[in-house]
Image (cartoon, rainbow, N blue to C red):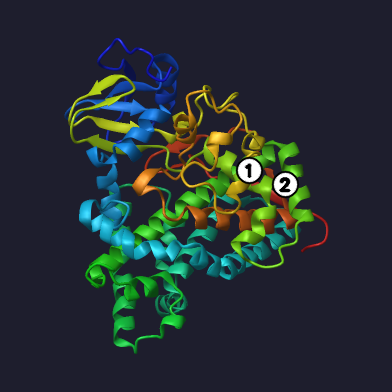
Amino acid sequence: MGGEHKQETRPPCGHARLAGGSADDALAQLVRDFAEFGAIHRVEAPGRPGETWVVSDPESIKRVLVSGHRNYSLGTGFERIKMLVGNGIIVSEGETWKRQHRMMQPMFSRSQVQRLGPLIMDVNRRRLDRWSSLADSGQSFNVTRETNENALEFILRATFGADLDRLVTRLGSNPFDMLTTESGRDLNFAFRFRQLRKHVERIIEERRRAPPPAAAEVHDWLGMMMAARDRRDRSAMSNVELIDEVMSLIVAGHETTGATLNALWYLLAGHPEVEAAVHAEVDAVELADLRLDSIAGLRYTHQVILETLRLYPPVWILTRRCIHADRLGGYEAPAGTAVFLSPYLVQRNPRYWPDPDAFRPERFAADDSAGAEGADDAHGAEQAEGAGEDGSSARRYAFIPFAAGPRHCIGETLAIYEMALHVYLAARRFRLRRVGTAPMELEARVNLRAREDLLMTVERRGAAR
């Protein structure tokens, strides 16, 4: 696998059809094509000019995302995201992206992430108090909805601060709730989501009319973005830029975390030995404070999060377009080739992950250095069990749930921190049990998520903590 057909100039053609970036059976067919044709193959893409390649070879992933990234623009599928977020950091390119990235990166420094610890704890504790009442009643509850709502509330409060409560009071409800109550991601959803921009604009305008806060009083993301100045020309973000970035933060920050935690509870419920190890760890660790370093003792919990991300990466496909002809895995990629990089496939490649479909958190046991933050691009996958023999770069890029290179997700540290605290607080108090035995089916659209909501019951674990 991985493109051994070096004598050919073009990779073999698989059977998958990627219409508009995905189709109902696209992921299943990509898995079958990977098994038959290897880690680099072509697929049919009706209506799309040029060739479309699916790449799950670590060396080629490194080439596209890191060493040769200047030769690749964002690919198909991003236009759908652009409909939601405008020209935010997720979809912008060139000098626009560089400027926005410079201005937003300080928001996700370790010191700023650490300041969000109390908010993460507060949001989770209020959510878990609700779980207590569910445990008392014995009724089942929708874990998919719960994890999404929890992640959304955190993102909204981190973004707007006290303005979120004022918005809800003024309107009588939270207009952003549609992100968790509506499962569809069609044009109607995109239209309704874009209507939320007017609420963001009103908050921005109200803040502009108010006396400017002291620097020490600026804690939420919107305030930080309004105060940010580009170090090159001291320019500030316009209202449109601010709105685009707020919408980007909401889209990128809630559904990915919610989907990962949904998968994590599903996996723990089906693997009692892993669940028991998590319970033993969280019972033994007392968090003295909320600093990032304080959760370094949750080593096994961290491994569980990484293994969940390996099996169910929310961003299951990354798309790029080859600007000039390039060589990937021994094949000649013509200019204009659409390249679909698949975290899902490379993270289940048996060459780098023995027994790849098995849930085995100990694969990441050697990754002690990652702590709460995680290794820079691959969470120490180069040290993971069975990392292979293709050199450190191949091992490193066999695990890319947060992408890699210049467009590596700037929120990775926060995402791991948020998920670790959620698991710590919940697992100390509760044990979750699935309703039914059917395996979780996946829907691979913009993000990878459960096709049907996951129902579970919650049981108390001794005295409430």
Q: Amino acid at mark 2?
A: Val
Q: As drawn, is 135 to the left or to the right of 377?
A: right
Q: Secondary structure at mark 1?
A: helix
Q: Relative to the observer, which residue lies in front, 292 or 358?
A: 292
Q: Position of residue 306 (x, y in %)?
A: 57, 42
Q: Relative to the observer, which residue lies in front, 260 or 305?
A: 305
Q: Amino acid at mark 1?
A: Val
Assess disc 1: are there few (<14), some (14-19) or many (≥20) residues with their C-alpha within 10 Å of its C-alpha.
many
Gap between marks 1 and 2 measured at Cα: 8 Å
Label number found at residue 290: none
Which residue reaches farthest bottom?
A: 211
Q: Position of residue 189 (x, y in %)?
A: 33, 53
Residue at 39% x, 61% y: name it.
Answer: 105
Which image quarter holds the N terminus?
top left
- Residue designated by label 1: 304
Residue at 82% x, 61% y: name it.
Answer: 463
Q: Secondary structure at mark 2?
A: helix
Q: Residues at badges 1 and 2 in contact (C-beta under 8 Å)?
A: yes
Q: Quadrant of residue 22?
A: top left
Q: Quadrant of residue 147?
A: bottom right
Residue 459 vertical placement versus 404 (above, below): below
Q: As drawn, is 138 to the left or to the right of 255?
A: right
Residue 246 in sight here: no
Q: Position of residue 73 (x, y in %)?
A: 24, 42
